[in-house]
Image (cartoon, grey):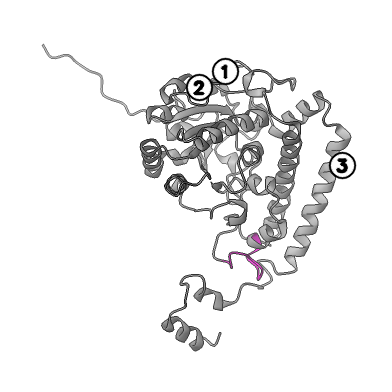
Amino acid sequence: MTQAYEPLRLHVPEPSGRPGCKTDFSYLHLTDAGTVRKPQIDVEPADTADLARGLIRVLDDQGNAHGPWAENVPVAILRKGMRAMLKTRIYDNRMVVAQRQKKMSFYMQSLGEEAIGSAQALALNIDDMCFPTYRQQSILMARDVPLVDLICQLLSNERDPLKGRQLPIMYSVKDAGFFTISGNLATQFIQAVGWGMASAIKGDTKIASAWIGDGATAESDFHTALTFAHVYRAPVILNVVNNQWAISTFQAIAGGEATTFAGRGVGCGIASLRVDGNDFVAVYSASAWAAERARRGLGPTMIEWVTYRAGPHSTSDDPSKYRPADDWSHFPLGDPIARLKQHLIKIGQWSEEEHAAVSAELEAEVIAAQKEAEQYGTLAGGQIPSAATMFEDVYKEMPEHLKRQRQELGI
């Protein structure tokens, strides 16, 4: 007897909130601060499955630190992290305004995500190599990269270190361990795994750190990187910044519904953690754990950072078209700067007065750097790198045919 079936239906994930509606964040599967265990550094990847489902948190809603992941985080790191996060947010704010003033063509801010890059940068060594996306400028702030150089890159002016060849915000700072940003999503993962493998082949002690967003996990490069990282035990940290939105597409479209992105690492034989990305202490502690694991030759670690993109995807985006305008104010993991500030005040290492003074100091620093950078030109001013530079930085020795072409152009 043939059984009758209902017609099949394709499942298309829906976001948890649309414009004009309130978002239901219950899908996040949160755990209380201090309740997730901290395993031994040599834990088997398969034994991290519970860590890929839970959420490593240290700071509670009152600013108190709890649990094993709170141990051994120096106060000096917390204070430096606070400065880096504040500097990132102030820088972002001023650069968005500069873009609106047509001084640059494009900008992408990291509002709400400042803890992730700054804390991991402080957990790594300066000669480790980061393979970032376009929302990790906090790494550069934590490593004190000169602001004038960064702003000149945004302005694509005559002092642009990349000579106008990269989209604004796609920095490249080798001395700060900041690999050239690629506009092609997920390439960072395979690049970092390859770099880490090369470090191991040379017998070096440097490790790599790669960054992508939740949407980029749907790219084939993501899966290729996981395979190579697992097979060759590459000394690499694989960071997935789950900020809930890939441009206008909700994270469930990339496979975040009823599972976690960190869980994919466990399935590929990689130790994996799921961490509160708005908890600076948790981010630093988890990053230090993963870095130590890589440096000891124990292989890669994949970390899913649960956070929220508080602003537009870029200056070309209007998020009010696809999500509630007040989403961030209801996000249960809060503001990373406000949370660390509360904790530092609680332990007597910060104050409202110091917060205001540091903010004013950093604002003045950014303003001064912007004024200096604009002396070398802005988008509207026409002060751009010489056309002669198009012939440079391709060959170690410029071949004769390029020399002739440059001479024909009279440059």
The residue depicted at 68 percent of the width and 56 percent of the height is 100
Residue 245 lies, in percent from the top left, at 53, 37
- Res 223 → quadrant: top left
The residue depicted at 63 percent of the width and 72 percent of the height is 384
Amino acid beneath label 3: Ala
Residue 288 lies, in percent from the top left, at 60, 33
Image marks 3 and 1: residues in contact by CB distance under 8 Å: no
- Magenta segment boundaries in residue numbering: 154-164
> Marks 2/1: CA distance?
7 Å
> Marks 3/1: CA distance?
36 Å
- Res 353 → quadrant: top right
Dot label at residue 51: 2
Count of all numbered marks drawn on residues in the image: 3
SS of the residue under disc 2: helix
SS of the residue under disc 3: helix
Question: On the image, numbered disc 1 is attached to which residue?
Answer: 36
- Secondary structure mainly formed by the magenta segment: loop
